[in-house]
Image: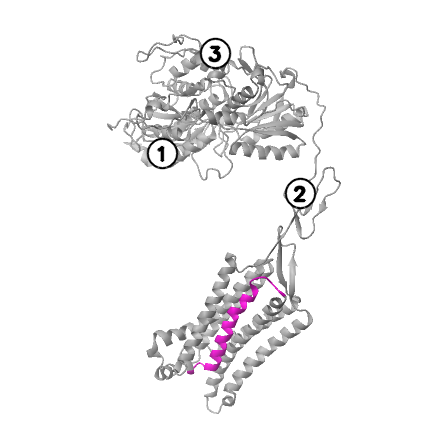
Amino acid sequence: MCSMNDPFPVPNEWYQPGGLFIGGMTSQIIYASQEVRFHEHPSQKLFEVSAIVTKFYQHALSLAFAINEINQNPMILPNTTLGFHIYDSYYDAMMTYRTTLDLLFKSHTFVLNYRCDSHKKLIAVIGGLGFETSSLMADILGLFKIPQLTYGSFPPKKNDLGPVHFLYHMVPNEAHLYKGIIGLFNHFGWTWVGLFIVDDDSGEHFLQTMELLFSQNGICSAFIQRIPQAPNLDDLDTVVDIFSSNYIDFTDDKANVFIIYGESMTIVWLRTITILQDPANWRKTSFKKVWVMTSQIDLILTGFQRGWGLHLFHGAISFAIHSEDVLAFKEFLQKGKPYWAKGDGFVNEFWEQAFDCSFPNLEEPANDFKVCTGEEKLESLPGPQFDLLMSGHSYSIYNAVYAVVHALHAVYSSRTKPRVMLRRGRFELQDLQPWQLHLSLNDVSFNNSAGETIAFNGETEMGGEFDITNLVIFPNNSFQRVKVGRVGPGGLGEKEFIIDEDIIVWPNGFNQVWLLSCCYDCAPCSEGKFAHQTDMADCLKCPEDQYASDDKNRCIPKTITFLHYQESLGISLTSLAVSFSVVTALVLGTFIKYKNTPIVKANNPNLTYTLLTCLMLCFLSSLLFLGKPGKVTCLLRQPTFGIVFSMAISCLLAKTTIVSLAFMATKPGSRMKKWVGKKLTNSIVLSCSLIQASICTVWLATAPPFCDLDMHSAKEEIILQCNEGSVVMFYCVLGYMGLLAILSFIVAFLARKLPDTFNEAKFITFSMLLFCSVWVSFVPTYLSTKGKDMVTVEIFSILASSAGLLSCIFSPKCYIIVLRPELNNREQIIKKRR
């Protein structure tokens, strides 16, 4: 046994022993986080300021009731007793993490990551009420592969939690709620609505979804009011600032219907804001408005709000999680007393706050509070404080317990069991691992004690529907929920939306006759157009040098842009061009320095010098494509690039031709000797280069490139670029270079097996193959891009093809000259050639 004491005890928990455990995480207690002072133990002050939401105590009771009911049923899990361990989230992230760890590692003592009480076997956890709490719990429970069944939060948007496969939702999909709200508005012809939305991510998602549905159904929002999340109670100044900065106008004449989206605490803060901004009228019974509430909301009153009343919400329409009456539950609650269950750490605090009394404490001085007798009746409490009827959230918890148990029973009853679960030929539930329960949980389908079929929809979401209820508030602040309809997926022969308006009780003074029509439905302007005033028949088109603002009510001037030297891409390309040109210059200097060595002499020095000079100019020619385009740069950049590149390829063609002719000339009686020499190489280089120069001259004389503005490629920018003038001539220049490259490749390929000391023909073959690959891929890429991207693609192709030629042809020779000088001699060359 672990002997360590808990340095930070949590005062509220409910523990009932058993062979297998189901954990519970409720949200009953709101506590004020205190500033930590080091002259006293933090736990002494942590929970001094707290309030319990008495109505939510039913959530813990429903879990205890379900487990006790199962333990009394000999047909389910024979010879196995279920236990439970319930904690609270305290509406605080730190405490949620802490109590989740307690569920995992504690029954009587707590040591993190150690299971000190081996008899506690946690198989699943039910909680929490809000999705924020559920996601915090999932951070820890997912690591241990323990199934978690949430009872009050909607499933998240896709990918919000990543691949969490152990999180189940006991509530229907939120899409049915959206469908119900639109169905309600369409049924009654309501077209104006005020929105009260909790100020968090879920509220923003709800707002975006509903605004789209409103626009599709001719419904208009008169205003949108964001309600702050629950602040910490210890910072009173912050609370006052939040309340005072959120003025709410309930007198809007357009909207007779208000939608409120959030959780139950949203009602608490909305009611508080209402009272604080108008203290004189806090008893006002109605604003003659209909409230439409979403399913996460339950009417609650806590602490000092007990006497305020809830008449503001009389006649509200609420979408509640579907529930059925569980008859034995009411009898179970009526037997409840402060001393009824050992291990219940919530009941005394609930009892004191619910009945406004206190239990005697011998360690504290006497006070003037009414003494709790323990015989007070729960049925005497008004609905906002406690309800004997099972709420939708409690019904979800009840079904969640049974879903876990039926999954366990399915594993127990199955004949095909994992080998790790066999002991002496007999299956024992104590050997069950939580992840094995998960494999069975999604396939569960059963009828509960209310006769309703409970099953998941195959996506870890509970199938089902929402009840549409009408809230009737009585003078004593109690209320009654009257079912007036339902909304759900609909089945064979069933409608998705059903409502009986004849039994609805409307707010006092509410006028069902709608005199206002919906707002003017303006068609949005198309892209590039705007409207600067209302009631315009047509949108105006922005000038080419301007673009329409996001709200399409004005035009904004476009900014002129081009591929700058100073931007990161320009700096990178410039650095590459300069670096490669410097490397080429170093190679040229090396060949000139070692011009009298055999390897340089054997490779036609003059042709080599010309090729290196052309390659250096190729790298530098890419700089003409960078910077602000001008008249001169536009005229020079493509012809310069074409001529220099053609000269470089001509040098390679001359090299391979001379090599081929030289070996043919060595045959007896060959007439090729007269063709081998400088005249042939010079003729090849000059003639091939002159043809490209002639093409460029015709291009410049007929349709030269010019500086141009691209107004349409980018929405907010004008791209300053060079227009190539004649596209045909541009592709003629590229085509001629391709022709020279193919000829060089063919000649080099045919000469690749000739005796050659340094495999010159093979290197040229590979370099031409690389060159052709770059420029073949350039054409489709260039055609599919616009603006600055076109310039970038061409610069990259120039640098890549030039670098390929430089490295493939000259790196082997430089290796011999610089690093292996012993190979740079006549004997080696003659030896290799033989």
Extreme bottom residue here? 669
Picture layout, residue 21 above or below residue 160: above
Q: CA distance from mark 1 to mark 2?
A: 65 Å
Q: Check disc 1 and report its element: helix, strand or loop.
A: loop
In this orientation, which residue lies closer to the viewer: 696 or 23? Answer: 696
Quarter of the image with the C terminus is bottom left
Picture layout, residue 422 above or below residue 658: above
State which tag comes first along the sequence, 2 or 3: 3
Q: Amino acid at mark 3?
A: Leu
**Residue range (magenta):** 601-630
Extreme right residue here? 537
Query: Which percent across, then down, holds residue 339?
Result: 35, 12
Query: Which percent across, then down, holds residue 496?
Result: 61, 27
Label 3: few (<14), some (14–19) or many (≥20) C-alpha neighbours in 10 Å: some
Quarter of the image with the N terminus is top left
Asked if marks 1 and 2 touch (Cβ < 8 Å), the reply is no
**Residue at x 48% of width, y 38% of height:** 160
Q: CA distance from mark 3 to mark 1?
A: 50 Å
